Amino acid sequence: MKGAGSKNWIWDSTNEEWVKQAGTAEGAMSIHAIVEELNDIEDVNVPAPGDGEGLVWDAGTSKWIAAAVGVTAHKDTHDPQDGSDPLDTAAPVKVGEANATGTSHSLARADHVHEKHHAKYTDAEAKAQAEGAKLDAHAAPDDTTTNDATAALHGLMPKASVTKLAGIDTGADVTGDNAPQAHAASHDFLGSDEGSFHQGLITGSRLFLFDGNGHDDAALWTKNTNGTGSITPGIMNTVLATGATNGSDATFRTTAGGWGLSTRYVKWELVGISQTNCDIWIWVSRTDGAQAPVNTEQYAGFLTTNGRLWCYSSDGAVNEATDTGLDDVDGTFVIKIATTAAYFWLNGVLLATHETRVPTNTNHYVKCRIDNTAAADKSCRIVNICHA
């Protein structure tokens, strides 16, 4: 049946009657399918959807499936202990050089534990800085300058000292079979442990010279003064003074000669010899007398003039002089005369060697003299004179 408003007749089995169904002019009909469940559609798999879920395509099954449209509370799924989607965790690092947010993809649990000595260094640089004392191990440090210095600060014994102690036998002492090592030579003149104020004493008005070879206490001393000069002997404190009158002097000398210097030396310990406006001589001479040395006598000695120290010697004809370049010096003065040279030491340092004008090295007098060159009281103090 054709025409505008054509109707198709179809059977209604429920009501058992024919009913009209509208169609097009050409008799075509529109069919509207009705399903009760989405799951009835062939490519949909949603047998029991939940509240808030929607259809999403599952490429694995090539079907539409139900899935939550929004994000719901699900923290427990990420529990690192028993969650269905646990987060990664790892042990914490040790203490570092500075604070940092870190770059790890793992989290540290709330009850994580640091080792007891977590600040102990492990890298080579920090270990080197902390190794000096080694207090944790209660051990002496390695035998290096830096570490030994650190050990001393902590009251520890350097390795070198430990080695020395380890070399001493149990029960050893310095008596009997373990006598002290012989070291007398170390106390000689220019020795490594040179003794001071040895082999000479001043007592009363007499200075004894000890040489261990017969010159016991037989050498008496003669005192000579001019103007306002004076000599005051004392134990390690014999004072020679000029007084205030210009041109005054004081000379302290052995009464007898006979002092040889070929294998021995004469040593003076003097204080206060560096002064202006005065000359101070300390010397040995083959000529007796209290006068200052002159070229015509054979002598060797030190002169300080206005504080400058000189070394002099003469062979009885012409003198030889050395300006030491030293000013304002006190201490230990030593003279020795060999066959071909005269030697001059100050405080253990050889200042001059005279090889041109050398006096004969036997039968000398030992002398000390002070002169002022202005109207001023000048003085020096003899602490010790010895011949050894």
Image: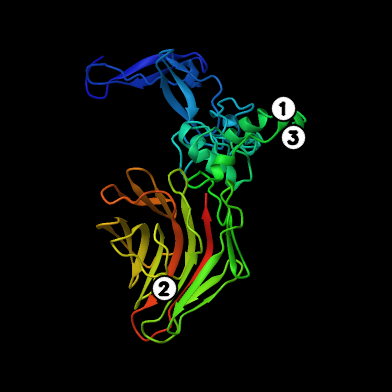
Q: What's the residue type where badge 1 is placed?
A: Asp
378 is higher (above) or lower (below) than 118: below
The residue that appears at 54% across and 61% down in the rendered structure is 384
Residue drawn 47% across the image and 54% down it: 266
- Label at residue 388: none
Q: Which residue is mark 3?
A: 173
Q: Which residue is mark 1?
A: 169
Q: Nearer the viewer, mark 3 or mark 1?
A: 3
Which of 241/115 is in front? 241
Q: Residue 328: x percent and y percent?
A: 38, 68
In the drawing, does residue 226 fall left or right of residue 137?
left
Mark 3–mark 1 Cα distance, whole angstroms, equals 9 Å
Does the CB distance between marks 2 and 3 fall below 8 Å? no
Sequence-wise, the earlier of marks 2 and 1 is 1
Of 376 and 320, nearer the camera is 320
Name the foreground residue: 107 vs 98: 98
Q: CA distance from mark 2 to mark 1?
A: 58 Å
In the depicted view, which residue is nearer to us: 349 or 344? Answer: 344
Q: Amino acid at mark 2?
A: Ile
Query: Which element carries disc 1, helix, strand or loop?
Result: loop
Q: Nearer the viewer, mark 2 or mark 3?
A: 2
Whether the residues at callouts 3 and 1 have beta carbons within 8 Å, the answer is: no
Q: x, y percentage for residue 151?
A: 58, 42
* Residue bearing mark 2: 370
